[in-house]
Amino acid sequence: MKNLSVLILVLILGSMAFAKDHSDEYQMGSVSKFTVKDGWVDTTTCSGPSGNVQCAGGISDTYTDVYTFTYNDGTQVVLRHVAFRADTLKTLNLENGSTVKVLYRVERKHGLVSIDYVLIPAADNPKKEGWYYMDGHFKKPTAKATAPAPAPATDQSNLAAMCNSDKLSPELKAQYCK
């Protein structure tokens, strides 16, 4: 009985932690996608009897999508997707070299090492947030940057979905949802 009451208490406290309202924590930033060549793969396969070996395949280039995130103060970082979380950047349908303004929030997880995550809601479902950590490549702004003006809502941005949801505070709705 004692163990059951402790378990129930832990579950209640845990659910309260997940129920925190983040409506006033969202800020405007932007995401850019770049496709870069990251190497090559040898797909050559050889088979056949000795003296009559035939080979097929060859060398193939491999490419990776790199996402650059710009905070509202102008600082740029490279984002890496956290495994087992939704990859909401895929919902933005970014073309190579294009930039889209998004609403985001930052969450710090404490442990042996504290880690900041950028949480970006999906463009089609604002309740689904993708978690991304910074790759450590920081580019500080050269001049004091001001917060960027809100972008018009497009089908690529998550702004329209966030404005139609209950995830933003009234102050942020007034600022971003014009």
Image (cartoon, rainbow, N blue to C red):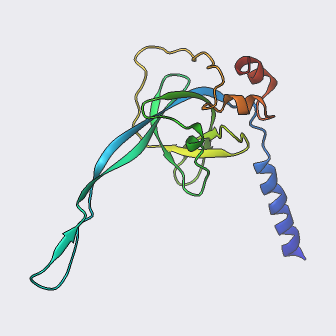
17 displayed left or right of 113? right
Above or below residue 160? Residue 10 is below
Above or below residue 5? Residue 103 is above
x and y, in percent, of residue 119 in the image: 62, 41
32 displayed left or right of 164? left
142 displayed left or right of 129? left
Q: Choose between 177 and 107: the one closer to the eye.
A: 177
Instruction: Name the residue located 74 percent from the left edge and 16 percent from the top edge.
Output: 178
Instruction: Name the residue located 72 percent from the left edge and 18 percent from the top edge.
Output: 175
Q: Choose between 144 and 91: the one closer to the eye.
A: 91
Instruction: Name the residue located 31 percent from the left edge and 44 percent from the top edge.
Output: 37
x and y, in percent, of residue 122 in the image: 65, 40
Q: Is residue 117 visible?
A: no
x and y, in percent, of residue 86 in the image: 61, 50
Q: Is residue 72 visible?
A: yes
40 displayed left or right of 166? left
